[in-house]
Image: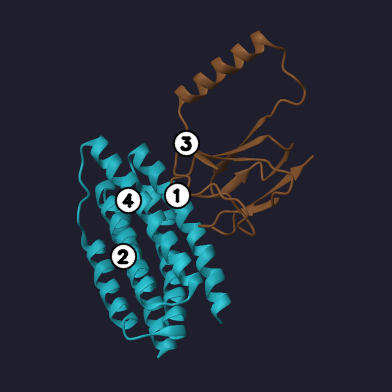
Chain colours: A brown, B cyan
Amino acid sequence: MMKNTYSRRSVMVGAAASAAVLTAAPLRAQDPTVHEVHIRAFSFDPDKVQVKVGDTIRWINHDLAPHTATADEFGWDTEEISKGEFGEVIVTKDMETSYFCVFHPHMKGTIEIL
Amino acid sequence: MKKLISALAVTLAMTGAQANAQDIAAMNDLEYAHIAYTADNIDIRYAHLALALSTNPDIHDFANTMIRDHTAVNEAALGLLDKLGASAQDNAFSQTLNANAEKIIAGFVELRGAEFDAAYAANELAYHQAVNDLVENTMIPNIDNAEVKALFEQGLEIFKAHEGHAEMMVKALK
């Protein structure tokens, strides 16, 4: 579980690193993917993500209110994500696939592991 | 006693907002900022009272969310005022909100257990309904500054989520 500040700089650094990797070796089909879920207006967008084991799910909070992405049975948790920050979870084989925001329980999302 | 306190809370929340709607419509952005800041702080006070007096984990979760969210809104409001080089202006409606809150808190401290939980939940629902109606229909349409208006719109989004959460809490406690 990670929590980071989401900034233009981190995106640019990430983009530069990706470009370097692409130059050095062709992207393999099994390379992990980062799936972004945007939290806006008290909703997860998209509210359902399709992922593979080893992928990363990144929740980015655009709301003024802090949020979390937390498994329904609390098996995993991003912890508090403030406005402008993001939290990440790496997909594992047996992870819970239904989640919600602990602070605002009406906010719900699902994960489909392919 | 429980019904009496709940009724008092609802009455104070509703009359405070409705009786002053016309006066509020004529106020300026800085007076609106003061009202919003005051309303946020009142709900934070209620939440701290709930943490002290309730033993219900759901009430504690809700109260902590009120503290967290209203603090975030107030910090954003202070940041915007600072950026604009302005200060919130005290006004008659902010004072009415504070006076009503004192009466509601005086009633709350007499309650314990399930009676307190039901009264707190009912007040949270009534309070958010009243404030949301005021923000959406009276304040936002009359705000001049675009950044202030955007902040109020974000605040309203949060307070509507709280209203829905409070509604579920009221039903669950019946």
Q: Can you give x and y, in whole percent of width and height, for residue B160 in the image? A: 49, 58
Element class at badge 3: strand
A13 relative to B103 in the view: left or right: right
- Residue at mark 4: B74
Q: Which chain carries label 4?
A: B
The residue depicted at 21 percent of the width and 37 percent of the height is B85
- Residue at mark 1: A65
Quadrant of the image containing the C terminus of chain B: bottom right
User: Label 2, label 4: how many angstroms apart (C-alpha)?
Assistant: 12 Å
Camera-side mark, 3 or 4:
3
Residue A80 at least partly seen:
yes
Q: Which amino acid does label 2 sit on?
A: Ile
When asked about the image quadrant of residue A49, the answer is top right
The numbered mark at residue B42 is 2
Q: Which amino acid does label 1 sit on?
A: Ala
Discs 3 and 1 lie in a common subunit: yes
User: Label 3, label 1: how many angstroms apart (C-alpha)?
Assistant: 16 Å
Q: Mark 1 lies on which chain?
A: A
Q: Mark 2 lies on which chain?
A: B
